[in-house]
Amino acid sequence: MNLILVRPAAKYLPAYVAALKRGYSPSTSRPEKRLQELEAIAADPDAFLGSCENFEGRGTPIKLRDGSHVAPLPGLVRWMWDGDFAGVIALRWQNGTPELPEWCQGHVGYSVAPWKRRRGYATAALRFILLEARQVGLPYVEVTTDPDNTASQRVIAANGGVLLGRKAAAYGSSETLRYRIPL
């Protein structure tokens, strides 16, 4: 496996757009994000790429599933790359605290393109993003997954995740399993 994480950049953008057009969504919980990203890229590719690193938490408020709006968190996006686009992993946090607001499911979210699954990419990408989590000062990350997503549970466990329990459904999301990975 020759997987690396790359900062979203113009040279990788055609492969990302091709994956989105093929049906890939960077969010397992929000499939509509695929179309939103295609629209954002078409409107202003440079602004889209710039939005993939947001260390200050600036930007347009985020609309939650229940219709309410919240300020964006600081965060960054990395693309999984094996010579072609393979998936997305994102890290989010609040400056000055490892805690997250109730509406946020976890520090890390990831999605591997369906045609690139079962290659260990999610496990490797999570391992790589933990290095960036340390760099922004987090002592741990929390990751959630659906109770029936055993593949994601294995990815988290392989990276030292400890099950904390269930996280109740909130803001239109479903109940999840909540893990903590100490850094």
Image: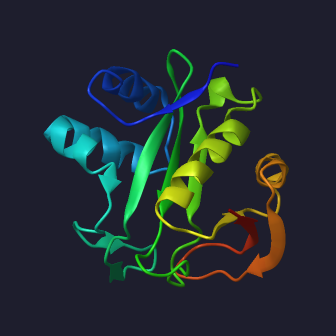
Q: Indicate left or right for 116 with 37 as reference.
A: right
Residue 158 location (% of width, % of height): 83, 48
Residue 1 location (% of width, % of height): 70, 19
Q: Residue furthest top?
A: 83
Residue 152 location (% of width, % of height): 76, 50
User: Measured along the vertical axis of the image, is residue 42 above or below residue 160?
Assistant: above
Determine which quarter of the picture holds residue 168: bottom right
The residue that appears at 34% across and 79% down in the rendered structure is 70
Q: Indicate left or right for 178 with 114 as reference.
A: right
Between 128 and 70, which is closer to the camera in this rendering?
A: 128
The residue that appears at 75% across and 32% down in the rendered structure is 120
Determine which quarter of the picture holds residue 142: bottom right
Between 98 and 100, which is closer to the camera in this rendering?
A: 98
User: Measured along the vertical axis of the image, is residue 26 above or below residue 15?
Assistant: below
- Colour mapping used in the image: rainbow
Between 38 and 70, which is closer to the camera in this rendering?
A: 70
Residue 28 visible somewhere in the drawing: no
Between 176 and 6, which is closer to the camera in this rendering?
A: 6
Residue 126 visible somewhere in the drawing: yes
The residue that appears at 50% across and 18% down in the rendered structure is 84
Q: Indicate left or right for 95 with 110 as reference.
A: left
Q: Indicate left or right for 33 with 48 as reference.
A: right
* Number of marks present in the image shown: 0
Quadrant location, the C terminus: bottom right
Residue 38 location (% of width, % of height): 30, 38
